[in-house]
Image (cartoon, coloured by chain):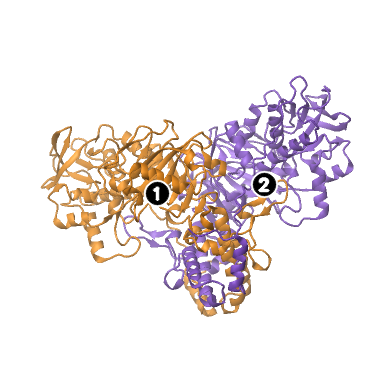
Chain colours: A orange, B purple
Amino acid sequence: MKKLISRREMLTLLAATGASGLVLRASAALNLVPDTQLARPRIPQADPNNPPTIVVLGAGIAGLTAAYELTKAGYNCVLLEASSRVGGRCMTVRSGDLIDEVGNPQICQFDDAPHMYFNAGPARIPSSHRNLMNYCKELGVDLEVFINENKECYYQDDAMFGGKPVKNTEFTTSARGFMAEIMAKSLEKDQLDMPLDQWELETLMGVVRSFGDLSEGDMFKGSTRGGYTHGGYLDHGEAKEPLAFRELLKSGFLRNALSASEGETGPILFQPVGGMDNIAKGFARKLENRIFYNVLVSSVKLNNSGVEVIYEHGGVKYKLDADYCFNCIPSHLMAGIDNNFPSEYVAAMRYPQRGEAYKSAFQTKERFWENDDIYGGISWVNAPIRQIWYPINGIHKEKGVILSAYDFGGGMAFTKLSQEQRIEAAIQQGEKLHPDYRQQVEKGITIAWHRMNHMLGCAARWPGSRGGANAQAEEMFQTLRRPAGGRHYMIGDQVTKHSAWQESAILSAHWAIKDMLSRQPGNASMPGTPLS
Amino acid sequence: MKKLISRREMLTLLAATGASGLVLRASAALNLVPDTQLARPRIPQADPNNPPTIVVLGAGIAGLTAAYELTKAGYNCVLLEASSRVGGRCMTVRSGDLIDEVGNPQICQFDDAPHMYFNAGPARIPSSHRNLMNYCKELGVDLEVFINENKECYYQDDAMFGGKPVKNTEFTTSARGFMAEIMAKSLEKDQLDMPLDQWELETLMGVVRSFGDLSEGDMFKGSTRGGYTHGGYLDHGEAKEPLAFRELLKSGFLRNALSASEGETGPILFQPVGGMDNIAKGFARKLENRIFYNVLVSSVKLNNSGVEVIYEHGGVKYKLDADYCFNCIPSHLMAGIDNNFPSEYVAAMRYPQRGEAYKSAFQTKERFWENDDIYGGISWVNAPIRQIWYPINGIHKEKGVILSAYDFGGGMAFTKLSQEQRIEAAIQQGEKLHPDYRQQVEKGITIAWHRMNHMLGCAARWPGSRGGANAQAEEMFQTLRRPAGGRHYMIGDQVTKHSAWQESAILSAHWAIKDMLSRQPGNASMPGTPLS
């Protein structure tokens, strides 16, 4: 067994070989530390005779997490929700459900069956999102695999092959083949320049040949990875001819086709069986009688002993005092609700840009994609619909619900259109991939998250999460994370650097609870007497 | 919209740019013909007063397919099976099941629960296997996604990092990064040699940078694709440092790590909910009273009007006459059963090499892999166990069944060992990946397919399916595909060029039925009168 080479030894070794030209990096990062730790706060049980009172504003995933954890620890929690359902953007649309888009309300007309649903907000749970996975386990939410990348899906781009859709498997097989050929050629030429010994170079050449499935002479002449023209079972199969690399270069999809399953979509992805909102409902089951719906908050004020919330329900105004407030109302809306927060706190609420996101979905007469070997996955389209998602739920049943458009920023061509125009445009774009699309689709729904009632915006975007940080943004971010008056916490993915994921919403609630606990001297139960 | 460029135009275009040095291939293969067609034979209904008689030998997938299709068409089918179960290698092991390995019979002691099973034979259904998928639909076999590649799984090789296991995501992220760096460097140097215009070259550079997630200066300095050392949600995350490329080169796994999900494991993979043998059971439900178990065939003879089969059951010998025989007994065993086949037919039965395959499985006390973010997928080990498979079924339940070894050829180190030694060796090898493996595993089972009763061999291997064809092998193959005496068909994956897949077994039965029909002049019902 070879010895583990230390980083220092390796650097020395590489320096010795003269790492000129091509540098082989040497940091032997054997750090197997997990990406996210389970961050569940350990909350000491509250004094049952004197539990602290908590008001949670908004029954999104962050609010539900906070209410669930604190209720479990014996706190006296009340959760106020503006709409008539839990989950916020964690929303599944089924037969009869309201899509409460301002100016374009719709009632979903899908057939009423367990598999005929549409996850209008988050639709994917990466297995690396440990806290969310852990809640699914704890709340008894059954999971099934979600398919993101499927080589049987298509790339369609008017700039490539005259607009003819290309199967992902042919696209990526050809792209890898040509890239491998380029590498192999340059390795042959440059081998003497490289700090590799003969064995290493030969190993690398083997890697390159295998990557592209190169033929003799290190040429890419097609691969059965891209499919067969015929045969392959009863007799010898002939590989399809490779696609022209020059055509592939014409499509912007080439850039990401070889790294499509990376980052958040790299791990195994899941969806709850029956709809994403089963997570929100799982929390809600544990919060019976603590959630109040159709409540409009009209004032949130800090006072000497906590937070005073004034809200309206059924035409009546109510006042509610609590020791602490956990607030996942979208911060740009909260900034417009009467409050006495410090001015820099309100400025921070207004600071981040709010995302736009548009989705639409169609019920289909048949699961036509399954006849094309497509089971789940995403086709990429260079048009405003951007993507078509095929459901992995309801395999081999008669009908299904597909995502027919997903515009996640930049233009929002669809939201300017009427409902009828939105549907028609999605059909026209989808027809380029599926010739009988128009005949297949029925009962379309559309959702513009930036126009949804009680939200008017999708995920907040803080500069700095993907580069571009600046001092002002960072100061705003830190201001909004600190509790106003030590008593009012903004929560939700909106106070994270990784918004638009439920894991972030959960972590924001965990963080706020831990911060609250850390500010209590004895850390056992809440100080003072209840004020209600 | 750009016009579709014809192949000829493209070749001309490339010739014009002078395709010297690096050749950009130009075959615009826009052929979207599916890889396998649905090959289900259309069988005219038999005359109900005079149905042809069919004897099927062996209730493997091929035999079940033949019996199912012909029974549906009104043929009088009888299926004789040597063991006490249907499926052949399509075998799921559950609590109380017998593993009938010669010299090492075992009764499975797993806990009795729906998710506590082990698919000892085929365990994956590629969605591209249309005929098998179609039967699942028709027979009501519920499917769920099977996970093959999971970036949270490990590579472990004593030659690399001193034997420390490396997460797939770190391994592949670093490998891609360094390969992209090599490509980028050579593109910068060689750009003038290439028949690419400036725009194409820049596009290609973008592809390469994205492929490897290169940093400024086209250097690979690590990527969050490989995970974070900390953060990434509530605050900015730091990417892990890259692994040393020189270490990666030491492992043979590098060769296939970047092309792990290709070929048969490229499409979305499925498994039947509850066990692979639900497919065999699905067929069997449709063949009530037509399947006879524990039958040992002692003679198969052609005569003037069909095939005469002599078999033994419960100590009694029986004679059965049929118009046709479909035979999926392993051909090397069939060659030893009394027959009057032409000598070249028997020689062809003996010709292909029979595969060896060894698997073992452990019940575990906990689903320890889920605490490591592993949900399904395969860890690769450079040791005789080769692989560890983590179940995707039973997510978040208490226990699970893992595949703890899968030796698919070349040595069969395990089969020489006693049952206790097999288990101990698998534990010792698995401990290198999972420190508490020994404490976690319980109730191990092992299966050596080449020693299983009634089989004594795994998939037949014909030269030529992956190159290496020769005239003799091809002649043997064609001989075995033709019906002996026009009445006796060998079926099963053993008479295909793509053995070890259920799709091939199905296609072999479809082919044989079609061949039988094509030899009948009227093609409507069988000639002559029944002989029974």
> Which chain does tag 1 point to?
A
> Which of B118/A442 is in front?
A442
For residue B358, the mark is 2
Q: Which residue is mark 1?
A: A406
> Which of B345/B89 is in front?
B345
Residue contact between numbered discs 1 and 2, judged by CB atoms under 8 Å: no
Q: In the figure, B50 relative to A193: above or below? A: above
Q: Is residue B317 left or right of residue B64?
A: right
Q: Is residue A99 left or right of residue A306?
A: right
> Which chain does tag 2 point to?
B
- Residue B56 spot, x, y in % from top left: 75, 31
Q: Residue furthest left?
A: A304
- Report how far apart the C-alphas of labels 1 and 2 lie in the structure: 46 Å
Three-letter amino acid code at disc 2? Tyr
The C terminus of chain B: image quadrant = top right
Three-letter amino acid code at disc 1? Tyr
- Crowding at mark 2 (Cα within 10 Å: few <14, some 14-19, many 20+): many
> Which of B490/A414 is in front?
A414
Element carrying mark 1: strand
For residue B70, the mark is none
